[in-house]
Image: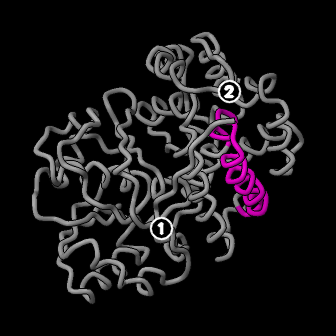
Amino acid sequence: MEFQLQIPTQIIVGKDCIGKNAALFPSFGKRAVIVKSGSAGKNGALADVVKMLERQGISYHVCDNVPPNPSPEDVAALLGYAPGFDFVVAVGGGSAMDAAKGVAVLAVNDIGAMELYNKNYEVKPLPIIAVPTTCGTGSEVTNISVLEAGDTKKSFLSPDLLPAIAFLDARYLETLPPQVAVDTALDALSHCVEGYLIHDSWATELFAERAFANFALYKDALNKRSFTKDELELMLFTATLGGIVINMAGTSAVHTLGYPLTVQKNVPHGRACALTLGEYVAFSYDAKREKIDRMCTLLKVNGVEGFKDMIGGLLPGKPEISKEELEQYTDISAQAAIRKKNAKPITKSDILNIYFASLLG
């Protein structure tokens, strides 16, 4: 068994963890740029960040709200080339985190938006401090950003994009719309399932299996769309576990198959992944029988069919989609999905079958 585990992000968990650890911020500089989602002003996260920066005498610039599923051009429009900032504070869900990583590059490199994908930057990206406000992205502990590119999504990554600090305060989840909480929790589950099946190491097993056991504790709350503060805290922590898993393992074809559903049909990212996750697990069963059985035991479901039923019960339904559209999405995603590390080799025909079984079955 060979693998590497590096978790340089300092993870700080708890109520008012930003205020209690404000003394950490001056070490990153005297001028911050804040990249945020629209909800950051509603859940109290932005106010907490601003209050802390002002208390520490740090000047700041607040970018416009990050749009859902931002493109490189959207990231460039947020800031573009702006020397003088010392660090970036990302406040929000996956879109804000992904955009903030792009801003961290563009703030110090005079390059075009699409050159983000070159991955080799003359100047090291700015340090990032992450404040997640959903329970799915895991981006607060990953070195990757995924942005919309044409009819799908495309990623760029660098070790320097790993946030320096992640502040996990579950209070910011209390204003999440219930379905958003479910969709993002499914994203975190997908991260853990995918990484668990494609990367054999005690480290991925340690984090993913803890996440599966956690998910079993709040899956009833997900079904009811009603959460206690303790459940929200556990959901937020589990999302970070999922981020650690994919930072080690990457994602599988499931994420790639989800991208066209998001870009073409406006299906939220976590839900888009969940739509094909059950059939992907079924497809992988003969290659990963022992792991999948273990996963289902921890999730307290009855085998693969029970896993599929659990996912199906959490989804609000399937998008209206035609056979022809799924054939088109297969053409869009197949090459990238096949290149991904998967639980077993996957073909274009397999991808089409997973799409059909998931969305037309």
The one nearer the camera, 255 or 39, is 255
Please provide percent x and percent y for residue 39: 39, 66
Left or right side of 353 for 297: right
Q: Which residue is mark 2?
A: 343
Of the residues shown, which amino acid type is indicated by label 2? Ala
Give the structural element (helix, strand or loop) at label 2: loop
Return the residue at label 1: 10
Quarter of the figure with residue 291: top right
Residue at the (64%, 77%) spot, across then down: 229
Mark 2 or mark 1, earlier in chain: 1
* Residue 210 colored in magenta in the image: yes
> Where is residue 269 shown, x and y percent of the image?
50, 43
Q: Which residue is located at x 40 percent, y 75 percent?
A: 45
* Magenta residues (range): 193-221
Q: Is residue 284 left or right of residue 83?
A: right
Q: Is residue 65 left or right of residue 257?
A: left
